[in-house]
Image: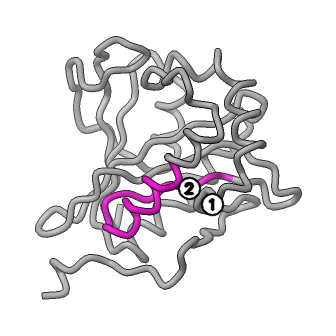
Amino acid sequence: MAFFRSIQLSETHPVVPGDGVYLRAPQMSDFPTWSTLREKSRDFLVPWEPTWPEDDLTRSSFRRRLRRYAEDMRCDQAYAFLLFRRDDNALLGGITLTNVRRGVAQAASMGYWVGAPFASQGYMTRGVSALVPFAFDVLRLHRVEAACIPSNQPSIRLLERTGFQREGYAREYLCINGMWQDHLLYAQVRGD
């Protein structure tokens, strides 16, 4: 039955167009810009992310990350994208669809980050707005989920602005910045 079959993308590195932005799978050539943006944004990102490994910003760690991303995509388990501004191809951040569940669920979890110099400028809103139709129309998912720490007001506004609906509250849901943190649970289903 097609309902239970995994999706096969025809491109190794799909490009997802958006309003003034685009999403593309990370490539090794992105490493210098990615590592610079992540380092410049470290203090901004650390409160909202899992603890960074000591070697997180090294070339070898990035190479391992790309191998994992490629394997996850090949197995239809996760899809990682970098977010770029269309005008000048500036790297702005990243968005992932992880924990892809097929069968009766047809769902995935969305995570995202934006570099500090590009925060609060609408870029991530445009990136998420591009990713959701890709998730529904190309990956044929029925549901995209997201979670955020209750004190992360910019993330709450982003999710609500892009059509996600609050569905609940999960105690000690994810280990963020070395601590188990409560999260607000959001989702968008096909047709919302």
Q: Is there a contact, CB below 8 Å, between mark 2 and mark 1?
A: yes
The kind of secondary structure element at disc 1 is strand
In space, the residues marked 2 and 1 are separated at their CA atoms by 6 Å
Q: Residues within 10 Å of mark 2 (few under 14, many from 20)?
A: many
Q: Label 1 belongs to which residue? A: 23
The crowding category of the residue bearing disc 1, from other C-alpha atoms within 10 Å (few below 14, some 14 to 19, many at least 20), is: many
Q: Amino acid at mark 2?
A: Phe
Amino acid type at mark 1: Leu
Q: Is residue 137 above or below residue 20?
A: below
* Residue drawn where x is 56% and y is 27% of the image: 55
Q: Residue furthest right?
A: 88
Judge whether residue 181 is colored magenta: no
Q: Quadrant of residue 87?
A: bottom right
The correct choice, above or below, for 192 with respect to 93 in the image is below
Identify the residue at the far bottom of this view: 1
- Please tell me which residue lies in front, 41 or 168: 41
Magenta-span inclusion, residue 82: yes
N-terminal of the pair, mark 2 or mark 1, is: 1
